[in-house]
Image (spheres, rainbow, N blue to C red):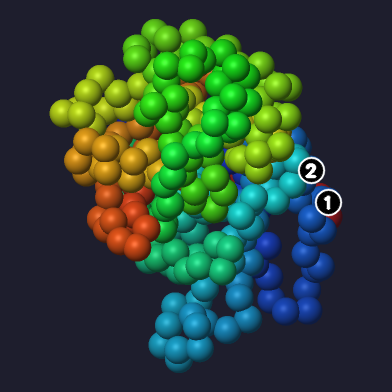
């Protein structure tokens, strides 16, 4: 799948593996095998789908729940936003309906996804709720380790935040789009700092101002085997929560992937701020190719 398309093109290549099978058939993959899939599929992430044993949460008329697990070559992630976009678009494409609703369990939480045919040929537009999101000030130690690894000056510290959605990550602004494009972090140093601090990575962003909802961003997460992410939905949701708190901006469109030649866009709309911010995510995805296992 190509997730978080911009104008019908680009997007983040994401492997979706359908492990939904009738009981008693093939054994599921091991976690070690799941870690191999991103490299084999030439993607940064892979999502693995399986049916839960019973529909819903015990309600007789509930929709079946599909369980989703996310892996990079380094291991399992508790959540992956663009992986969720890819999974929902994949499930909708296989359902064959013009509009499709599905419940997906991610790390113990049920995500209610909605999907419909997109404006671009072959694309599916999906929406789901991300959250809750927690925001806090970064500690001096976090800034001392992360900003030099990003090659960013200490002057950006006042606007930096640590946001947690699944895992914590640093949100840090730069003043111009050209500064964002020219950014060249030290991957080894950044990975070591993130491992030491227990952070997923760093989401560096630029916004022309509080009156515009268009944001450009880059996500660096070498600690999980992703030096730079083409699209990072969860960090976009975190940024939306932060910008609402800081500037009252209720909706943003986040452009990413240009530095990697794969333009992507995700829309994040804040719908609730208590007890933690809840954000609706909208993205578009398309099936790029289908690979079947050898028998």
Q: Residue at x 37, y 58 (%)?
A: 276
The 10 Å Cα crowd at callout 2, few under 14, some 14 to 19, many 20 or more, is: some
Relative depth, front residue between 213 and 2: 213
Whole-percent x and y of residue 283?
Answer: 37, 43
Relative to 154, say whether 178 is above or below: above
Residue at the left extreme of this rendering = 211
Within 10 Å of the Cα at label 1, are there few (<14), some (14-19), or many (20+) other Cα atoms?
A: few
Query: Which residue is located at x 55 percent, y 21 percent?
Result: 147
**In this rendering, does residue 244 appear at all?**
yes
Residue corresponding to mark 2: 36
- Towards the viewer: 39 or 224: 224
Residue plotted at (76% across, 51% down)? 34
Q: SS of the residue at dot 1? A: helix
Q: Position of residue 129 (x, y in %)?
A: 37, 58
Q: Secondary structure at mark 2?
A: helix
Q: Can you identify the residue that label 1 sits on?
A: 32
C-alpha span from label 2 to label 1:
7 Å
In the displayed structure image, the side of residue 14 where residue 159 appears, left or right: left
Residue 177, percent from left and from top: 36, 13
Q: Quadrant of the N terminus?
A: top right
Is residue 267 or residue 145 the one in the foreground?
145
Q: Position of residue 63 (x, y in %)?
A: 44, 78
User: In the current view of this chain or complex, which residue is farthest to the front?
Assistant: 140
């Amino acid at each position: 799948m190509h997730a978080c398309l911009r104008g019908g093109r680009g997007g983040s290549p994401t492997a979706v593996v359908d492990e939904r099978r009738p009981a008693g058939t093939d054994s599921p993959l091991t976690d070690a095998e799941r870690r191999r899939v991103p490299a084999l599929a030439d993607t940064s992430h892979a999502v693995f789908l399986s049916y839960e044993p019973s529909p819903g949460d015990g309600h007789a008329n509930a929709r079946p729940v599909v369980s989703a697990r996310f892996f990079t070559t380094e291991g399992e992630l508790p959540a992956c936003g663009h992986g969720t976009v890819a999974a929902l678009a994949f499930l909708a494409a296989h359902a064959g309906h013009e509009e499709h609703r599905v419940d997906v369990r991610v790390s113990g939480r049920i995500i209610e996804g909605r999907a419909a045919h997109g404006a671009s040929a072959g694309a599916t537009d999906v929406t789901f709720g991300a959250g809750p999101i927690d925001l806090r000030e970064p500690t001096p130690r976090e800034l001392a380790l992360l900003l030099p690894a990003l090659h960013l000056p200490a002057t950006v510290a006042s606007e930096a935040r640590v946001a947690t959605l699944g895992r914590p990550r640093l949100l840090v602004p730069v003043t111009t789009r050209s500064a964002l494009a020219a950014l060249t972090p030290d991957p080894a140093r950044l990975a070591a700092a993130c491992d030491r601090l227990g952070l997923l990575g760093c989401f560096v962003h630029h916004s022309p101002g509080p009156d515009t909802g268009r944001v450009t961003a880059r996500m660096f997460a070498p600690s999980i085997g992703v030096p730079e992410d083409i699209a990072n939905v969860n960090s976009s949701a975190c940024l939306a929560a932060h910008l609402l708190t800081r500037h009252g901006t209720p909706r943003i469109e986040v452009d990413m992937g240009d530095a990697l030649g794969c333009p992507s866009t995700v829309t994040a709309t804040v719908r609730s701020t208590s007890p933690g911010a809840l954000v609706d995510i909208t993205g578009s995805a398309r099936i790029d190719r289908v690979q079947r296992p050898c028998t």
